[in-house]
Image: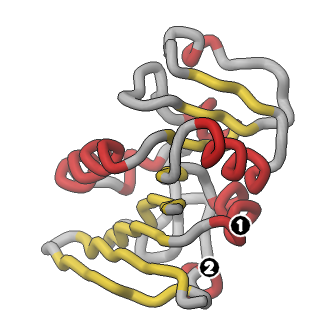
Amino acid sequence: MRVRANLVVGSDGATTLNGRSAGLSSAKDRNRFHAMRAEFDVIVIGGKTAITEPYQKTPIPLVVVSHNPLIPESLTTNPMLYWWQISPAAAIAKCLAEFGSRVLIEGGPNFLIAALPKITEFAITQTKISGGENRLDLAKLLREFALISEEGLSEEIFQIFKRIN
């Protein structure tokens, strides 16, 4: 079983800039982000991410977890969309049962915190950009994870963390 959360954060812990994660991400990071999807069976996101980020087309099934029963019109063109009104932890368990043993989470801070008990690894890109929104305390989030790899670039650091217990 592999449940990876993938996110980009600014130097101040921001996970969005002007309401979207793309403002924090470089072209190289976005390429890595899209290539990473080939390693997984399903993508899971929260309702807020579904509204603010572009998920009209995904190479693998996309599960949106939201208490809101209304699907944003922008997502109705994605033929691989599933809209579930259950908890993040329940959604991850259901994804593992229905899609395969490799789940990729691309949700925001609230979703990640709710899903944390099910997450086995994190892929995090840290950028030098600051001044964004939706800040996350990485040290607190990663206290049960160990750094296993790191790639430093001029404007960002890409790290993989795995759960230690």
**SS for dot 2:** helix
The residue that mark 1 highlights is 113
Residue at 69% across, 55% down: 111
> What's the amino acid at mark 2?
Leu
Q: Is residue 66 above or below residue 81?
A: below
Left or right: 103 as drawn, with respect to 117:
left
**Of 3 and 158, which appears nearest the observer?**
3
Residue at 39% across, 87% down: 147
**Of 60 and 50, which appears nearest the observer?**
60
Residue at 28% across, 82% down: 149
**How crowded is the residue under tag 2: few (<14 C-alpha within 10 Å), some, or many (20+)?**
some
Quadrant containing the C terminus in the rendered view: bottom right
Residue 159 image point, x, y percent: 33, 76
Residue at 58% across, 22% down: 81
In the rendered image, which quarter is residue 156 located in?
bottom left
Mark 1 / mark 2, whichever is N-terminal: 1
In the rendered image, which quarter is residue 150 located in?
bottom left
Residue 144 image point, x, y percent: 60, 88
> What's the amino acid at mark 1?
Ile
**Of 148 and 131, which appears nearest the observer?**
148
Circle on res. 141: 2
In the rendered image, which quarter is residue 84 located in?
top right
**SS for dot 1:** helix
Separation of residues labelled 1 and 2 (CA atoms):
8 Å
**How crowded is the residue under tag 1: few (<14 C-alpha within 10 Å), some, or many (20+)?**
some
Residue 37 image point, x, y percent: 35, 44
Question: Does the CB distance between marks 1 and 2 fall below 8 Å?
Answer: yes
